[in-house]
Image: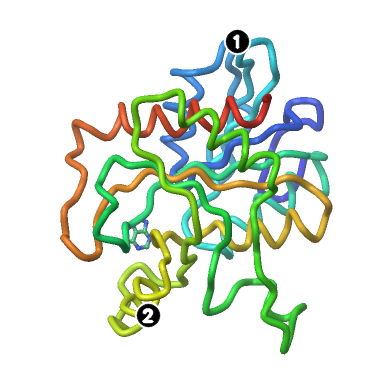
Amino acid sequence: MTIHIGANHEDIAETVLMPGDPYRAKWAAETFLQDVKCVNEVRGMLGFTGTWSGHRVTIQGSGMGMPSLSIYANELITSFNAQTLIRIGSCGAMQENINVRDVIIAMTATTLSTPSRGIFKEVNFAPCADYGLLESAVAASRKRDVATHVGGIYSSDVFYDERPDLTEQMTRHGILGVEMEAAELYNLAARHGRRALAVLTVSDHLITHEALPADQREKSFGDMVEIALEAAFA
Ligand code: HPA
């Protein structure tokens, strides 16, 4: 057990999917895993362990933003020996050719800052995905009927961003979408020699202002979860 994860060591699998929303962790575990057991309820940040195609998987909520994700990812890595950590979550699209419901697989994550800034100091470290996971996720996505984009994303510190010029610069430099967690997951995986990836579903669009209606979320998020699971065990 750790401060924020009330599970026994053996209750957490080596492969962990991390949605921001703890209720999405519950939905994904109940929808895609067998023999599901709730392994964490501390602070309502639900975690579940079960099996997928015979492989043990934990799905643990990370909360919103890099400081929250950093708590859970650190404990999963250093206390529970998690080896493969895949963020599954939503993002806002930043390019015209991307639509809501599309999937984005994040090769890199640009930031203004991360909780690792204190370590890197003057260095602008480039958080990047594990290449093997990335390749497997792209292959898994090609087998599915879902438009998938692969490239750089922006891990922001704010949802209500008062700097439209930053969004403009991200779009101009080809960034596919914005979310708030992936960069620090990539930093932590690099630091501890683990594999990390973020597979995201586009829930809203920063240019067209389109948003995914609530009743269409489930199917779209399902593609993302299945891509993540296939990539983890490819
Ligand atoms: N901004 C930041 N994070 C997000 C967004 C967004 O527009 N959409 C989903 N996660």
Tell me which residue sits at (77%, 30%) in the image: 8
Tag count: 2
Whether residue 44 appears in this view of the structure is no
Mark found first going from the N terminus, 2 or 1: 1
- Amino acid under label 1? Asp
Q: How is the image coloured?
A: rainbow
Locate residue 172, reporting x and y percent.
36, 75
Tell us which disc is closer to us: 2 or 1: 2
Q: Is residue 193 left or right of residue 123?
A: right
State the residue in front, 172 or 18. 172
Q: Could you tell me residue 47's position as x and y percent?
A: 58, 34
Where 116 sits versus 187, above or below?
Answer: below
Q: Is mark 1 within 8 Å of ligand 1?
A: no
Q: Which residue is mark 2?
A: 169
Q: Which residue is mark 1?
A: 35
CA gap between label 2 and label 1 equals 46 Å
Residue depicted at 27% across the width and 54% down the height: 97
